[in-house]
Structure formats: structure tokens, C-alpha cells
Amino acid sequence: KPWKDYLEPKNFNILGGEPLLHKEVPEILLLSKEIFPKSKLTVFTNGIPLKYSKRLEEIKQALISTDTQVLVSFHSLDKKYRQEIQESIDILNRWRKEGLDIVFRDCITVWTKRYLLDEEDKIKPFDDKNKEKSWEICNCKYCTFLLEGTIYKCAPIALLRRMKQIGRMNSQFEKYLESYQGIHFSAKKEEIDTFFKNNFKPEFICNMCPAYSRKIKNKTIYGVENESKNI
């Protein structure tokens, strides 16, 4: 809420993790529309949690009253995954026939790697040392991310500290954590203006991401992924 008097985003996307895992999805939708009434709301989901939800009707009604789009991303060709998601697809197709804005997006061929894994299965940066090139190919460069009252350049940066908290971050990321600060709603107006002035251009922290595209041909959910370099 503290940001509502300063920001009026054209689009406000509700992301995760997986947002539909949250028990208060209807309340989040209604609050988002209250805070940003002029924004187009979109929920990004893999769809799977819908079939387990005990609040399906409430979620549907909240989507209708807030005119929220549901964007469902297909992650893989994995047969087990496709079977797992089918029931949720059926629910969404019924909602679509009722007039809800449901979009199915095939993301199987557009997944890209944002980090590497070390021998302990911890994430580590690419360190390609070409922030301009990393920015140029970045899929997140216009995806400013709001988390717990603080705005970050993108989701990978915003979630980096959480990866550290759960022991999944390689120490090579420390220099990036030390170099970057998001902007909190309690900051002075001049500081907020400066943050947004620099937000949509390359910064040192962009070096943590690859300087060339590393697409994953088929992101398997229950097996080993296939990676394609330099695409």
C-alpha cells in the first residue's frame, strides 16, 4: 500500500514462485486492484495448484471482479507433468468459456538459464563480465519486482537473498549482494527517482547473468533438462 501514492503501473503481475499456492489468493487479487485500480492485473501460474484448491469459486469470482488475466505457462513435454496439469487445464478451459481472460503460453522453447550450479547444487553466477550484453539479451530487464515493500530491478535479484537464507547460494554471489540495494517505500523521493532513473539500464549486478543466451530446449520437471547454448 505505501507505494500506491507514488506508482501507477500500466501492468501489475502477480508472480511467485507459484502464486496459486498462497491460501489467500482471492484477498491478494482484491487488494492488488484496490492499490492499483488502473493497472491491468495478471496472475502468472503453472496452473497445477488449482485442482487442489478448496477456494476455486472464490478465486474465480475474485478474477472476475478485478478483471484479472490468468497466464498459464506450460513448462515441459514431460508426460508425467502433462498428466499432472490436465485437470487444472480443464478447470481453466471451463472458466474461459464463462468469459474469464485465460491465456495459455507455451514456454517450453523459451526457457533460459539465469545461473549455474556448483558441485553442491548451489546457484552461482555466470560472471561473463559484460553487463551491457547481459542487459541486451535479458528477458527480465523490464520486469521490475516488488517484494516485501522493496522494489528491485528484477526477480532474480529480488530473490537472491532468499536463496542465501536457505543455503542455496554460492559465495560468488556475495559481491553482487553487496553492490546492489533495492529501493524501499520509506526512501526519500530523490532516492526513489534516482533508483528508477538507473533501473532500466545495465548495472554491475547484471554481470551475474549470462552475456549470451543459454536456452533450455525442454525443461523437464522430473528428470534432467536439456540445454542449448548460444541460441
Image (spheres, grey):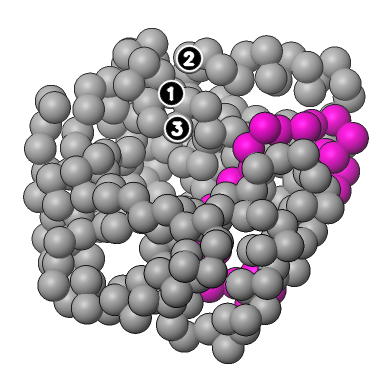
Residue at 32% x, 21% y is 137
Left or right: where 188 falls relative to 218: right
Q: Is residue 24 magenta?
A: yes
- Say above or below: 230 vs 118: above
N-terminal of the pair, mark 2 or mark 3, is 3
- How crowded is the residue under tag 2: few (<14 C-alpha within 10 Å), some, or many (20+)? some
Query: Which residues lie in the magenta part?
Result: 1-25
- Say above or below: 48 vs 15: below
What type is the residue that disc 2 sits on?
Pro
Residue at 22% x, 22% y is 212
**Residue 178 in sight from this viewpoint:** no
What type is the residue that disc 3 sits on?
Cys
Helix, strand or loop for disc 2: loop
Helix, strand or loop for disc 3: loop
Residue 136 locus on image (x, y percent): 36, 16
Choose mark 2 or mark 3, whichever is in front: 3
Residue at 59% x, 33% y is 144
Helix, strand or loop for disc 1: helix
Residue 140 is labelled as: 3
What type is the residue that disc 1 sits on?
Cys
Q: Residue furthest bottom?
A: 54
- Say above or below: 201 vs 86: above
**Residue 5 in sight from this viewpoint:** yes
Residue 62 locus on image (x, y percent): 69, 68
**Label 2 – label 3 distance at C-alpha:** 12 Å
Residue 206 is labelled as: 1
Rendered-image quadrant of the C terminus: top left
Q: Which residue is mark 2?
A: 202
Residue 221 locus on image (x, y percent): 22, 66
Left or right: where 228 falls relative to 37: left
Residue 89 locus on image (x, y percent): 36, 71
Q: Nearer the viewer, residue 218 or 205?
A: 218
